[in-house]
Amino acid sequence: MKAQESTTEKVSFFDNPKNIKIMMIVFYVLCALLVLLDFVVHRHIYLDFEKIPTFYALYGFVACVVLVVLAKLMRKVVMRDENYYRDRDDLIGTESKDEEHQS
């Protein structure tokens, strides 16, 4: 009996591909609805380029793409070797062991 119980684990909501597909459909419908509302909702426009239809959707998309590209460039600068901290801990650990042996 216990062998059957251990094989039936509770599946997470996000592990089910059907749930993910439903979430993506809802997401796309909401995005389309927001773009369509952009044509209906009255805005108080201060600058001329805000008159472009779907300006804020395009602005948000371009800003997101720029953030991703900048993050990839920053990764090259900030990224360290995979063993950066482990090697450093090993180095510190061996120094203290060497001091103990010399005493």
Image (spheres, rainbow, N blue to C red):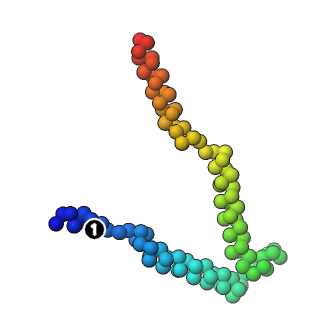
Residue at image point 47% right, 74% down = 20
> Viewer-proximal residue, 74 or 34?
74
Residue placed farthest to the bottom in the image?
A: 40
Residue placed farthest to the right in the image?
A: 48
**Secondary structure of residue under mark 1:** loop
Question: Callout 1: 10 Å neighbours few (<14), some, many (20+)?
Answer: few
User: What residue type is disc 1 on?
Assistant: Thr
Q: Name the image quarter holding residue 15.
A: bottom left
Instruction: State the quadrant of the C terminus.
Output: top left
Say whether residue 102 is left or right of residue 7: right
Residue at image point 61% right, 84% down = 33
Across and down, in percent, residue 23 comes to 49, 76
Say whether residue 8 is left or right of residue 24: left
Residue placed farthest to the top in the image?
A: 103
> Viewer-proximal residue, 70 or 15?
15
Across and down, in percent, residue 2 comes to 18, 63
Residue at image point 69% right, 88% down = 40
> Which residue carries the number 1 mark?
8
Across and down, in percent, residue 13 comes to 40, 71
